[in-house]
Amino acid sequence: MRCGAKIVAGLFLVFLAVSSFAQPTSLPGLRAIFSTVDGKTSDTKIESTLGLYVPEGQSATAFLPAGKFNVAWVGFIRADLRDDVMFQAEVNGKFKLEVAGTNVLEAAN
């Protein structure tokens, strides 16, 4: 498994969690769980890809106020044990990648 990260300046926090222990009946896609930094407000979306851009001063979703927020993407990757899998991230704020509960990559600016 190879991982890389590039940090750029920004105002929001990003967290990522990917589990390889998905049930065989699980559908492809990622559940994006958005929340305010204080955790009082949250919103969940199903996404087909992992990517996010929120301009400064705007909200991440219609149910969150503008400003800093957290987002966790939860999903699964189907891969054979001996497959080479590459993760690459360009992030603003903080980033954490977990695979099957193991911390694979962390970055912060």
Image: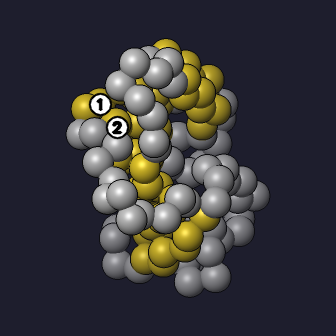
- Residue named by callout 2: 98
Q: Give me the residue at 48% from left, 77% from top.
A: 43
- Residue 99 in the image, given as x and y percentages of width and height: 34, 36
Q: Give me the residue at 34% from left, 70% from top.
A: 39
Q: Residue furthest bottom?
A: 63
- Residue named by callout 1: 103
- How many residues crowd around disc 2 within 10 Å: few (fewer than 14), some, or many (20 or more)? some
Q: How does the figure colour the protein chain or chains?
A: secondary structure
Residue type marked 2: Glu
Earlier sequence position, callout 2 versus callout 1: 2
Cβ atoms at labels 2 and 1 below 8 Å apart: yes
In the image, 56 versus 25, the foreground residue is: 25
- Residue 38 in the image, given as x and y percentages of width and height: 34, 68
In the image, 95 versus 56, the foreground residue is: 95
Q: Give me the residue at 43% from left, 50% from top.
A: 76
Q: Is residue 8 above or below residue 28?
A: above
Q: Which mark is residue 62?
A: none
In the image, 64 versus 28, the foreground residue is: 28
Q: Give me the residue at 71% from left, 65% from top.
A: 57
**Residue 90 appears anywhere in the view:** yes
**Residue 36 appears anywhere in the view:** no
The answer to whether residue 9 is left or right of residue 36 is right
Question: Label 1's element?
Answer: strand
In the image, 46 versus 78, the foreground residue is: 78
